[in-house]
Every structure is written in structure tokens, then in C-alpha cells.
Image: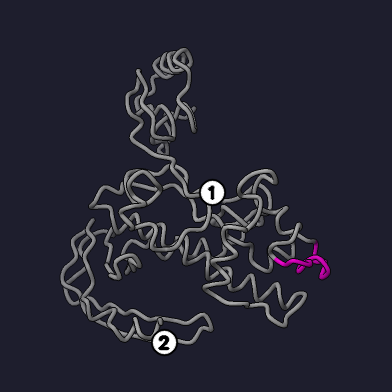
């Protein structure tokens, strides 16, 4: 039923671990009997099978928030989830629901939309990962969020506090998820071959691991991925402070094409804007943007 589908890329015999030898042999016989002609990968993690050889992929995390610079840091690429090789299942984790989705989740009850403890409350935790696991709360996300955005709910309560937090959280999720996809695009010529976001959507309303939530509502994580994956995209590498243009569109980007970069503060105020032009950018390539596009003025404004 699957082999004729255009979307089928490979058959994975297992997820995290290499299957027992007898199971591998039975799978190998089954795919042969079915006339399967596409690759068979032993597992979604970095393992080697006696039948199918090295998996050629990795499942090294992360599953929680990391700084945007993580993805292009060579130290993260070597043995971890940074932009190198093919990552079958990773994510920056936190993707708090939009205010509309959260309101629908709590049944429109104003007393529940911002419980005592806010995003670290038992109610918010109930909409994260396994209650007994590492990802049972937004604990990896909230300290970094507070450092980067400040106390966005100071002096607020109820729906107003929920709105302030969840709107700012969309910006944080857009940044974190956009950075992951941007990192893999920026390093495609250095050995980054692909990345699968964990997950596309949840079967239960959750504040983690989705591009659109159980209510089918896209949030910041979706728009971060969308911006990073446009056929022609201007991308920022926070690890080495460079901007680049990735062209995966149909044909070259012609010489003289205009680039524009802006820096916007957490209050929505534009702090910096600069434009420049690019030389010809061939299809399937990544070219550094002119250094003048992100000048010392931008760095000073960001500080």
C-alpha cells in the first residue's frame, strides 16, 4: 500500500534502537517480498546494522529550548543536534499555544486562562510532555525567556497576563524554530543534509513540540519555520554574526537583487534598517550577504 506513494522516501525498521538480529532478518525478508525498492534504514538513530549497514542519520536531540546560536556552533554539530548530517527527530521544544488556542483548551474559563503560577502552574504543565519525564513543564524555556524578554506580565493578571505572555512566547518560538531550520540551510554545503521537526502537530493541546497545535492553529514556531524555508531566504547566523542568502528556488537570483535587513526590539519598535544588493546567486547555493548589511550600527542597536 505504501510503495507506490510519491511521498515515500525510505522504510525505517526502528526508532531509537537497533532491532534484534532476528527482527532485522524478518523485516528484510518482508520488504523483499513486497518488492520494496527504496532504501531501508535500520533506525532513526545513529546505529549500524549487519544487514543494512550504517543508518546514516542521527537522533541526538535537542528536544528543548537552546540558544539560536546552537545550530551553527561546530561543537553542537559534532555528536549533538547541531546542523550536521540528517537529524530525524529534533526540536527547540517550547511552542506555547496562541491565546485563542489556550482559551479554547480551558473552555473559555477566565479563571483558568492564567492560573496561579502562570506558565509554571500545574495546569500549564498538564499541557506539556510526560508528567514524569524531562519535558513535563516549560522549565527549559522559561529562564531563557525571562532573560531575553523580561517580566512581560509584571502588574498584569487574568486574560491580560495570559495575552502578554503568550504573544511574547510566539516571538520566542518563531526565533528558536526559525534558527533551527536556518542553521541546517546555512550549513548544507558543510554536511548538513536534512532535519525533521518533532513534531508537526499534537494530538492533544500542548505548549511544546508543534508547528501548529491540536486546534490546527499555527503559532510562532510555524512562522519561524516558514520564514527560514522560503525558496529564497535571507538568513542570519547568530553564531558567527553573518547574514546569507539561501537559494533553493527555480533558477538563479539575478545580480543586483535588493536585500533589506531590519532589527526590531521586543516592544515592536524598529531599531535598525539597512539595504544592499547581491551578486548572482546560483540555484542550490548559499551566498554570504555583503558585510555592510549587518553593520556595527545594528550590533550597537541590539546591545
Residue at the image position 38 percent from the left and 19 percent from the top: 35
Magenta region's main secondary structure?
A: loop
Q: Which mark is residue 271?
A: 2
| Residue 184 colored in magenta in the image | no
Residue at the image position 34 percent from the left and 83 percent from the top: 298
Real-space Cα separation, disc 1 to disc 2, in angstroms: 34 Å
- Residue 39 position (above or below residue 155): above
In-front residue for pair 152/215? 152
Location of residue 253 in the rendering, given as x and y in whole percent from the top left corner: 22, 67
Going from N to C along the chain, the mark reached first, 1 or 2, is 1
Mark 2: secondary structure: strand
Q: Residues within 10 Å of mark 1 (few under 14, many from 20)?
A: some
Q: In the rendered view, does 242 fall on the left or right side of 110?
A: left
Location of residue 73 in the rendering, given as x and y in whole percent from the top left corner: 33, 57
In-front residue for pair 4/15? 15
Question: Which quadrant of the view contains residue 163?
Answer: bottom right
Q: Quadrant of the C terminus?
A: bottom left
| Residue 109 colored in magenta in the image | yes
Q: Mark 1, mark 2: which one is toward the viewer?
A: 2
Question: Which quadrant of the view contains residue 113?
Answer: bottom right
Location of residue 272 in the rendering, given as x and y in whole percent from the top left corner: 37, 86
Location of residue 157 in the rendering, given as x and y in whole percent from the top left corner: 76, 77
Which residues make up the magenta segment? 107-118
Q: Quickly name the residue at label 1.
A: 199
Mark 1: secondary structure: loop
Residue at the image position 48 percent from the left and 16 percent from the top: 23
Q: In the rendered view, does 165 fall on the left or right side of 18?
A: right
Amino acid at each position: 500500500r505504501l510503495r507506490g506513494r510519491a511521498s515515500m522516501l525510505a522504510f525505517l525498521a526502528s526508532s531509537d534502537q537497533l532491532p534484534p538480529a532476528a527482527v532485522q532478518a524478518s523485516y528484510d525478508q518482508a520488504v523483499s517480498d513486497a518488492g520494496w525498492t527504496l532504501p531501508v534504514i535500520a533506525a532513526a538513530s545513529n546505529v549500524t546494522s549487519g544487514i543494512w549497514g550504517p543508518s546514516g542519520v542521527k537522533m541526538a536531540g535537542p528536544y528543548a529550548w537552546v540558544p539560536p546560536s546552537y545550530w551553527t556552533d561546530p561543537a553542537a554539530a559534532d555528536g549533538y543536534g547541531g546542523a550536521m548530517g540528517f537529524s530525524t527527530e529534533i526540536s527547540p521544544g517550547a511552542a506555547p499555544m496562541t491565546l485563542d488556542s489556550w482559551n479554547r483548551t480551558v473552555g473559555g474559563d477566565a479563571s483558568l486562562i492564567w492560573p496561579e503560577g502562570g506558565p509554571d502552574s500545574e495546569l500549564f504543565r498538564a499541557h506539556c510532555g510526560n508528567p514524569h519525564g524531562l519535558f513535563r513543564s516549560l522549565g527549559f524555556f522559561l529562564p531563557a525567556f525571562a532573560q531575553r524578554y523580561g517580566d512581560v506580565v509584571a502588574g498584569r493578571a487574568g486574560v491580560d497576563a495570559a495575552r502578554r505572555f503568550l504573544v511574547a512566547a510566539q516571538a520566542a518560538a518563531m526565533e528558536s524554530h526559525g534558527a533551527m531550520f536556518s542553521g541546517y540551510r546555512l550549513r548544507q554545503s558543510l554536511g548538513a543534509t536534512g532535519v525533521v521537526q518533532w513534531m508537526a502537530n499534537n494530538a492533544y493541546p500542548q505548549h511544546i513540540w508543534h508547528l501548529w497545535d491540536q486546534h490546527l492553529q499555527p503559532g510562532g514556531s510555524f512562522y519561524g519555520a516558514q520564514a527560514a524555508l522560503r525558496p529564497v531566504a535571507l538568513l542570519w547566523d547568530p553564531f558567527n554574526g553573518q547574514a546569507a542568502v539561501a537559494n533553493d528556488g527555480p533558477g538563479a537570483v539575478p545580480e543586483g537583487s535588493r536585500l533589506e535587513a531590519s532589527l526590531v526590539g521586543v516592544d515592536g519598535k524598529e531599531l535598525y534598517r539597512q539595504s544592499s544588493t547581491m551578486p548572482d546567486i546560483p540555484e542550490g547555493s548559499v551566498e554570504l550577504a555583503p558585510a555592510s548589511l549587518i553593520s556595527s550600527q545594528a550590533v550597537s542597536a541590539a546591545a
